[in-house]
Image (tube, rainbow, N blue to C red):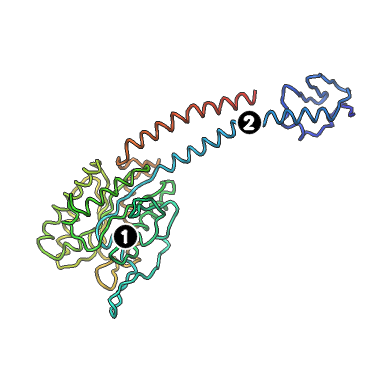
């Protein structure tokens, strides 16, 4: 038996969660439902039992709210993961990447040196759509399963993605869609032909699990410098290609980042470059690769050049992105039906759950 006098001798920690209606603590008295007054003997065992029982009741009442809170957090995380920022990478070998690829003149075999600069290293926030149309973590060589008949090395894609995330850490997941094929002419990218059809198919497939296509990254033209006719018709063909892509993806204002040639396979490099630099199209940015260091073959960009190019392309794209607040609505291409259904379902389920959570918490503290 314990005599309660001017001060309370029962440890405070044992009473932390005791229900307010069952226990009232003052400097002079210890009161329960039995109204045990000051200087009254208290059965410590009974008090401890009531304390533990009340604590258990409180914890059991809190359990549904805690479970609901966990569910809300998980559901919010699922919604956030749907915000994938998708970029289509198309063109020929310098987009596919030949950085670090060397040719053994004795055997005629080309190999990649395997060197991956820090700016091109993998990142959990950078994904790529592989040849099987599955999202996987992106890594160099980015085009190895698309431009499979060639030896691939470092391209501008990974440097681009890392640079965007470096400047905007809250940008979200970057999804790269490799489509470039080495040695291809602009005529092979015409609407209805295989390369074009594969690119559009992959672009649309990239939207199936949520996300938005933010831009087309385009680097092509070296093969069109061989013949004068190809060089002279390049601008018309390229402009039609850009408009066809926007039309088939139902995005008339899709941002396009194109690269003006650093080299070519033939003598008409300047004609093609002028065609690229002379295109006047809304939401088109041109990054000039002239002067970037080349591989010994004089045609393909070196690894450091690809890193520099990726950074420049990122800077060009970020001109479309407001710095504060960050607004991703620079391109309207998304799986509209899926996005609307996802958002509708999310808020339909989350609103009543959130209200229920607040109600439980309110009743708990009454």
Residue 29 vs 83, above or below: the answer is above
Name which residue lies at 77% across and 34% down. 14
How crowded pointer 2 is (Cα within 10 Å; few <14, some 14-19, many 20+) is rated as some
Residue 129 horizontal side relative to residue 357, left or right? left
Q: Earlier in the sequence, mark 1 or mark 2?
A: 2
The quarter in which the C terminus is drawn is top right
Separation of marks 1 and 2 at Cα, in angstroms:
55 Å
Mark whose residue sits in front, 1 or 2: 2
The relative height of residue 300 versus residue 343 in the rendered view (above or below) is: below
Task: Tell me where residue 268 sits by quadrant.
Answer: bottom left
Q: Which mark is residue 309?
A: 1
239 sits to left or right of 254:
left
Q: Quadrant of residue 33?
A: top right
Residue under the image location 25 percent in, 52 percent down: 198
Element class at badge 1: helix
Report the front residue among 322 and 174.
174
| Circles 1 and 2 in contact, beta carbons < 8 Å | no
Left or right: residue 333 versus residue 242 is right
Expressed as whole percent of the image width and height from the top left, the position of residue 319 reads 32, 48
Q: Is residue 235 above or below residue 16?
A: below
Q: Nearer the viewer, residue 54 or 358?
A: 54
Mark 1 Cα within 10 Å, few/some/many (few <14, many 20+)? Answer: many
Q: Which residue is mark 2?
A: 62
Residue 163 image point, x, y percent: 39, 55
Residue 312, image x, y percentages: 32, 57
Task: Please report the residue visible at 32 percent of the width from the left and 39 percent of the height from the top.
Answer: 335
Residue 349: mark in rendering: none
Can you say which quadrant of the picture contains the N terminus?
top right
Q: Is residue 343 above or below residue 292?
A: above
């Amino acid at each position: 038996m314990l005599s309660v006098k001017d001060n309370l001798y029962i440890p405070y920690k044992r009473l932390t969660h005791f229900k307010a209606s069952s226990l009232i603590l003052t400097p002079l008295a210890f009161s329960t439902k039995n109204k045990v007054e000051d200087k009254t003997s208290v059965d410590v065992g009974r008090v401890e039992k009531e304390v533990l029982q009340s604590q258990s009741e409180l914890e059991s009442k809190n359990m549904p709210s805690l479970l609901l809170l966990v569910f809300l957090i998980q559901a919010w995380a699922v919604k956030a993961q749907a915000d994938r920022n998708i970029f289509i990478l198309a063109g020929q070998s310098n987009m596919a990447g030949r950085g670090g690829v060397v040719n053994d003149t004795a055997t005629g075999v080309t190999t990649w040196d395997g060197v991956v600069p820090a700016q091109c290293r993998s990142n959990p926030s950078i994904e790529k759509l592989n040849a099987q149309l599955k999202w996987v973590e992106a890594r160099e060589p980015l085009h190895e399963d698309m431009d499979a008949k060639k030896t691939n090395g470092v391209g501008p894609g990974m440097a681009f993605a890392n640079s965007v995330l470096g400047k905007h850490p809250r940008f979200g997941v970057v999804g790269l869609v490799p489509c470039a094929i080495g040695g291809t002419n602009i005529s092979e990218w015409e609407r209805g032909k295989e390369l074009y059809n594969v690119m559009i198919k992959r672009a649309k497939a990239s939207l199936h699990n949520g996300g938005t296509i933010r831009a087309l990254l385009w680097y092509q033209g070296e093969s069109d410098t061989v013949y004068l006719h190809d060089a002279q018709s390049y601008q018309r063909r390229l402009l039609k290609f850009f408009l066809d892509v926007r039309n088939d993806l139902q995005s008339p204002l899709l941002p396009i980042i194109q690269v003006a040639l650093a080299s070519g396979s033939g003598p008409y490099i300047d004609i093609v470059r002028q065609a690229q630099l002379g295109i006047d199209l809304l939401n088109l940015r041109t990054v000039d690769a002239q002067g970037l260091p080349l591989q010994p073959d004089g045609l393909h960009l070196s690894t450091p050049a690809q890193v520099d190019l990726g950074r420049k392309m990122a800077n060009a794209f970020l001109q479309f992105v407001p710095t504060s607040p960050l607004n991703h609505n620079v391109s309207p291409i998304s799986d509209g039906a899926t996005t609307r259904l996802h958002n509708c379902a999310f808020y339909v389920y989350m609103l009543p759950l959130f209200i229920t959570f607040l109600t439980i918490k309110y009743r708990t503290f009454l």
